[in-house]
Image (cartoon, rainbow, N blue to C red):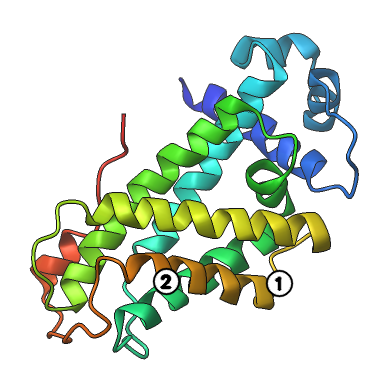
Amino acid sequence: MRRRGVERYNLLLDSTERLLSRDEDEDISLAQIAEAAGGSLASVYYFFPNRNAVYVALARRFNEEIYQRSIIPPTDPEPQTWQELLAVKHTAAAAFQNSRPAALRLFLGAGVSVSVRNADFAGNARIAQSRARMLEAYFDIQPLPQLPHWLEISAAAMDGIWALSYGAHGRITEEYREEGTACAVTYLRRFLPEFLPRKPLEQAALDRIEVAPLL
């Protein structure tokens, strides 16, 4: 898209996020999105055939924001155990979602569509790949080709607990965040030893953390 088209596309997503952030359970229409963006309904249809397509695009944008935060190496202080590294990353992810009510509603709400859910799964798979590389950068760990898959499953279990928190409290509380992390750690203990030796951080290993978007 040309720059003007990109700006219009992002304006529609911004408007949808604002509408989803309201404390309302009512459905949002394309007409409401158009009005919130200060444009015509035809201008929305130019980019999106239906409301669910807007939701999927917004979910992908949220996923990219979450991913960019997830690959930042924790260094102050550096985690000394793999359990601590996960807790740090989970805390940051919960804080981000709590700061963006629309993300909570899209990813943890009861009315999530299959397309939005699949977009969320794709984002989680990418994070799992980079998280495996982050663990390899921080700890002396033997090659485990299945590690990204195990991390993805642990994240799905944690998301279920976060959805429970959202349904009960409208946000991810610290209590449920801790329970979600405990669930993920308990699952990963099936495959990882309780203690992994730390190793010095090397730039080459840190550079490997970022992975390309999954197709």
Q: What element carries label 2?
A: helix
The answer, for residue 9, to whether it is visible in the render is: no
Amino acid beneath label 1: Thr
Residue 139 seen? yes
| Camera-nearest residue between 153 and 102 | 153
Question: For this view, does 125 lie left or right of residue 119?
Answer: left
Name the residue at the front extreme.
190
- Quadrant containing the C terminus in the rendered view: top left
Q: Which amino acid does label 2 sit on?
A: Thr
- Contact flag, marks 1 and 2 (Cβ < 8 Å): no
Q: Which of 149 and 46 is in front in this view?
A: 149
Marks 1/2: CA–CA distance: 20 Å
Q: Is residue 109 left or right of residue 116?
A: right
Say above or below: 205 vs 197.
above
Give residue 208's quadrant in the image.
Answer: bottom left
Disc assigned to residue 186: 2
Q: Which residue is drawn at 64% across and 10% down?
A: 49
User: For residue 179, what is the image quadrant?
Assistant: bottom right
Residue found at x 45% / y 77%: 88
Above or below 126: residue 4: above
In this view, 195 is above or below 95: below
Position of 164 compared to 156: left or right?
A: right
**Mark number, residue 173:** 1
Residue 45 location, x and y as percent? 68, 11
Q: In this view, does 143 lie to the left or right of 120?
A: left
Q: Is mark 1 on a helix, strand or loop?
A: loop
- The residue lying at 71 percent from left, 72 percent from top is 173
Image spot of residue 168 (x, y percent): 81, 60
